DNA sequence: GCATTGACGAAGG
DNA sequence: CCCTTCGCCAATG
């Protein structure tokens, strides 16, 4: 099929009801409590595996998400709280994670590999 | 239309 | 453990 819709037009259309952001938010909202995932994992699940940056970018817009998105459970592949600054002037993100029994040290999730929640594996229904 | 930026990822020093 | 370089896509100026 060569009837590919203009990407720009498509985006403009979906921006009203359904956007790349909402896809990310939808996945993020399904992250179990006490678990964490990475931008790359979500990107891979959405098919945009080449651009984990876009996921982070969507997370930045999560402030517009309703209901709010547990973005504090979404971190980078190294288990580092890369976006903690976006939660508050202090380590708000870390506090939220520790509240969910997620240990954080040096802005990094302890045993991140064990707490890692991969939507592409856990959420493939 | 080009340049810069960005809550990334991986590899190298 | 810390920093640098490259690649990636989309938004923004």
Image (cartoon, coloured by chain):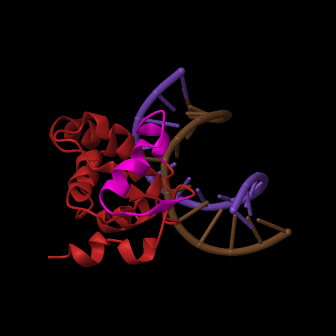
Chain colours: A red, B brown, C purple
In-front residue for pair A118/B1: A118
Q: Is residue C12 above or below residue A71?
A: above
Magenta highlight range: A83-105
Q: Is residue A44 magenta?
A: no
Q: Quadrant of the C terminus of chain A?
A: bottom left
Total labels drawn: 0
Q: Quadrant of the N terminus of chain A?
A: bottom left
Residue A104 x/y as whole percent: 47, 60
Q: Is residue A94 magenta?
A: yes
In-front residue for pair A8/A50: A50
Q: Is residue A12 left or right of residue A104?
A: left
Q: Quadrant of residue A103?
A: bottom left
Q: Is residue A24 above or below residue A19?
A: below
Q: Quadrant of residue B3?
A: top right
Q: Quadrant of residue A75?
A: bottom left
Residue A33 x/y as whole percent: 24, 62
The residue depicted at 33 percent of the width and 40 percent of the height is A8
The residue depicted at 53 percent of the width and 55 percent of the height is A107
The residue depicted at 24 percent of the width and 55 percent of the height is A3
In-front residue for pair A91/A29: A91
Residue A122 x/y as whole percent: 23, 76
Q: Is residue A89 left or right of residue A59?
A: right
The residue depicted at 20 percent of the width and 76 percent of the height is A124
Residue A83 x/y as whole percent: 47, 46
């Amino acid at each position: 099929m060569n009837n590919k819709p203009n990407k720009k037009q498509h985006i403009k259309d979906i921006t009203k009801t359904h956007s790349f952001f909402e896809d990310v938010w939808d996945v993020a909202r399904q992250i179990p409590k006490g678990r964490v995932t990475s931008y790359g994992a979500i990107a891979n699940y959405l098919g945009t595996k080449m651009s984990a940056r876009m996921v982070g970018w969507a997370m930045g817009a999560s402030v517009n998400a309703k209901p709010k998105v547990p973005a504090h459970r979404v971190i980078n592949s190294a288990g580092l709280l890369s976006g903690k600054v976006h939660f508050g002037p202090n380590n708000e993100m870390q506090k939220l994670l520790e509240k969910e029994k997620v240990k954080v040290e040096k802005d990094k999730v302890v045993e991140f590999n064990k707490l890692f929640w991969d939507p592409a594996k856990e959420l493939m229904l």
